[in-house]
Image: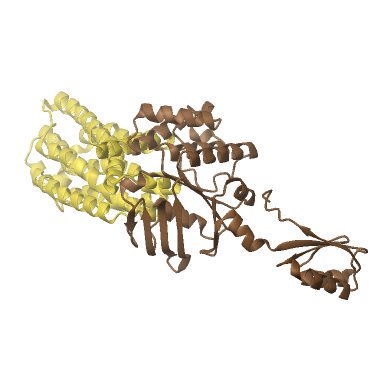
């Protein structure tokens, strides 16, 4: 069941078209990874999902309620959403305790309940020792953990995260990913923007590839890999190619290392023509073999 | 208390905690009130003792000339503390309120804390009232304290020298009654401006313009262009109430969350 649907969403900032014709849905308890380069529109799309921006055109259906162009989420919808953006959005002059109590109060959570929830989450994220420290004295990574606690304080049904592991050490990043996986089992849907390909394999239920404000592809990770994978073959040559031969190999998209050339083909049927092309270049081929894809550790 | 009231109070409490945890705020919040509460009365006493007659003749003209020497000084003090210093005093709540209010939305924007606030399930009215309360309460308490200290010092002098207590009087009391509305109007304007500018400095610069009409009032009194009587402050009360309501109503209606973070 979809808890959030974006229907042909576009977003303009004055003359800049940040998003164009975005349509996607987020299922209950799912993890959706949004991946794309800088400036692709990931943050803008996530801010629209979280209700920080309104769309310039299109409609959003959030938890069964429809929002047209320019319409802001109601408080009842906002109650169900947690968000951690590119900024921590924590008050540096207040302690972690005071920050989380404040945000808890915004969601109608009492001080005691907020303290208990905060301490429990901080223990899980290995950050309990900072509970009475001022946020301004903490490292980036710790602030990121506190920001996640803040976003989870209201036990949201939808959690929107914008590159949450950006400033975390590998151990903390892994702890965070485990926490996010646990959320999925608790039926919290997660939308997670990242530039780290290795996180795709670790987390992805569904993937949305975004570039220049448009969705390039979406689907499960396997569906996307099937579309882009093709086949990689490795040709082992009897002699290393000379400069002219290297140039010619690069023209056909081959990656040359020593006497090995790795070439992408669409299907195994192309192998004979590849072999002929190599011979035509004056190269002597020892073997041609199939290589599997390795996308950030995910096969 | 309804949830909305609790949310506004939570925002106000947080803002006040944040503001007063920074040492920078104590300069304008203590320095200016101390100047008004202590230095101004001392200045008034000094001027009345040593130059009151001459200045009274210049300012008050025939009224002063017709009185005896002692009463001239008293007439001068009464006129000076009410008609000249009164309007100057009104700048104090405006300044203290605008210092706090300029940080309200502009500060959240500058420190990039606005997102977490805006994603929460709070109404625009909660946000506005919370921000306004955070600025209004300290400004009003400081104003009350300063008015009281000032009145005590002047009364101490006039009772000792002339056997007359000048405070409280109708004009002064109406000015005190005007001060919360002046605070709310100032804060309302500054908060609205603050939500539309990029940072605190811009908000402070624009909010300084709000205090400008108040700063002109003492000069108007000194040059006898207009007399700021009890009637004037009574009318001002009504006018400020209407302006305050209009600003708050419009500000909340037109508030755009996206402008806080885009």
- For image coordinates 14% across by 25% down, the residue present is B159
**Quarter of image, res B57:** top left
Give A3 or A171, whichever is nearer the viewer.
A3
Colour of chain A, in one word, is brown
Res. A77 visible in picture = yes
Give B127 or A203, whichever is nearer the viewer.
A203
Q: Residue B127 location, x and y as percent?
A: 31, 45
Residue lying at the far bottom of the rendered structure: A280
Residue lying at the far top of the rendered structure: B160
Identify the coloring: by chain
Q: Residue B41 location, x and y as percent?
A: 24, 33
Residue lying at the far right of the rendered structure: A239
| A115 sits to left or right of A144 | left
- For image coordinates 42% across by 66% down, the residue present is A14
Q: Quadrant of the C terminus of chain B?
A: bottom left
| B16 sits to left or right of B217 | right
Res. B31 visible in picture = no
Q: Quadrant of the N terminus of chain B?
A: top left
| A64 sits to left or right of B179 | right
**Quarter of image, res A248:** bottom right
Q: Residue B234 location, x and y as percent?
A: 10, 45
Give A123 or B219, whichever is nearer the viewer.
A123
- For image coordinates 88% across by 61% down, the residue present is A259
Residue A153 drawn above or below residue B114: above
Residue lying at the far front of the rendered structure: A269
- For image coordinates 44% across by 53% down, the residue present is A47
Q: Residue A157 location, x and y as percent?
A: 41, 43
**Quarter of image, res A264:** bottom right
Question: What is the total number of numbered labels drawn onto the structure image?
Answer: 0
Q: Which chain is yellow?
A: B
């Amino acid at each position: 069941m979809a808890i959030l649907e974006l229907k042909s969403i576009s977003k303009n900032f004055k003359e800049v078209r940040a998003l164009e014709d975005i349509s996607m849905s987020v299922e209950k308890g799912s993890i959706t990874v949004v991946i794309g380069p800088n400036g692709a529109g990931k943050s803008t799309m996530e801010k629209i999902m979280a209700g920080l921006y309104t769309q310039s055109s299109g409609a959003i259906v959030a938890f069964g309620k429809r929002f047209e162009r320019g319409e802001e989420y109601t408080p009842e919808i906002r109650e169900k959403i947690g968000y951690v953006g590119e900024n921590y959005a924590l008050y540096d002059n207040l302690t972690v305790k005071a920050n989380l109590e404040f945000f808890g109060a915004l969601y109608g959570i009492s001080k005691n309940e907020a303290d208990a929830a905060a301490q429990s989450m901080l223990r899980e994220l290995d950050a309990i020792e900072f509970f009475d420290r001022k946020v301004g004295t903490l490292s980036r990574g710790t602030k990121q953990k506190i920001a996640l606690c803040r976003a989870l304080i209201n036990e949201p049904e939808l959690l929107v995260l914008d590159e949450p592991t950006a400033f975390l050490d590998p151990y903390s990043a892994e702890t965070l990913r485990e926490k996010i996986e646990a959320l999925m089992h608790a039926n919290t849907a997660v939308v997670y923007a990242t530039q780290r390909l290795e996180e795709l394999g670790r987390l992805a239920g569904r993937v949305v590839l975004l570039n220049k404000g448009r969705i390039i592809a979406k689907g499960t990770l396997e569906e996307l890999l099937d579309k882009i994978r093709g086949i990689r073959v490795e040709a082992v040559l009897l002699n290393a190619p000379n400069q002219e031969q290297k140039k010619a190999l690069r023209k056909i998209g081959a990656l040359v290392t020593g006497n090995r050339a790795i070439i992408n083909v669409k299907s195994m049927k192309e192998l004979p023509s590849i072999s002929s092309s190599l011979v035509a270049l004056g190269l002597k081929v020892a073997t041609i073999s199939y290589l599997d894809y390795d996308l950030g550790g995910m096969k | 208390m309804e949830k909305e009231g609790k949310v506004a109070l939570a925002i106000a409490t947080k803002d006040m905690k944040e503001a007063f945890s920074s040492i920078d705020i104590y300069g304008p919040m203590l320095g200016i009130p101390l100047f008004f509460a202590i230095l101004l009365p001392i200045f008034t006493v000094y001027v009345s003792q040593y130059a009151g007659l001459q200045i009274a003749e210049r300012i008050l003209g025939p009224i002063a000339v017709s009185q005896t020497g002692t009463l001239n000084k008293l007439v001068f003090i009464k006129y000076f503390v009410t008609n000249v210093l009164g309007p100057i005093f009104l700048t104090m709540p405006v300044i203290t309120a605008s210092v706090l209010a300029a940080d309200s939305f502009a500060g959240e924007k500058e420190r990039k804390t606005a997102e977490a606030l805006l994603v929460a399930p709070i109404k625009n009215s909660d946000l506005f009232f919370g921000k306004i309360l955070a600025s209004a309460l300290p400004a009003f308490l400081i104003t009350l304290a300063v008015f009281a200290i000032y009145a005590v010092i002047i009364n101490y002098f006039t009772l000792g020298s002339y056997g007359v207590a000048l405070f409280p009087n109708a004009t002064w009391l109406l000015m005190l009654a005007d001060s919360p509305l002046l605070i709310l109007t100032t804060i309302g304007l500054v908060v609205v401006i603050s939500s539309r500018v990029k940072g605190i400095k811009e908000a402070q610069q624009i909010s300084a313009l709000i205090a400008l009409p108040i700063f002109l009032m003492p000069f108007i009194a000194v040059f006898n262009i207009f007399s700021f009587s009890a009637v004037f402050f009574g009318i001002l009360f009504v006018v400020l109430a209407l302006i305050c309501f209009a600003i708050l109503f419009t500000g909340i209606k037109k508030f755009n969350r996206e402008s806080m973070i885009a």
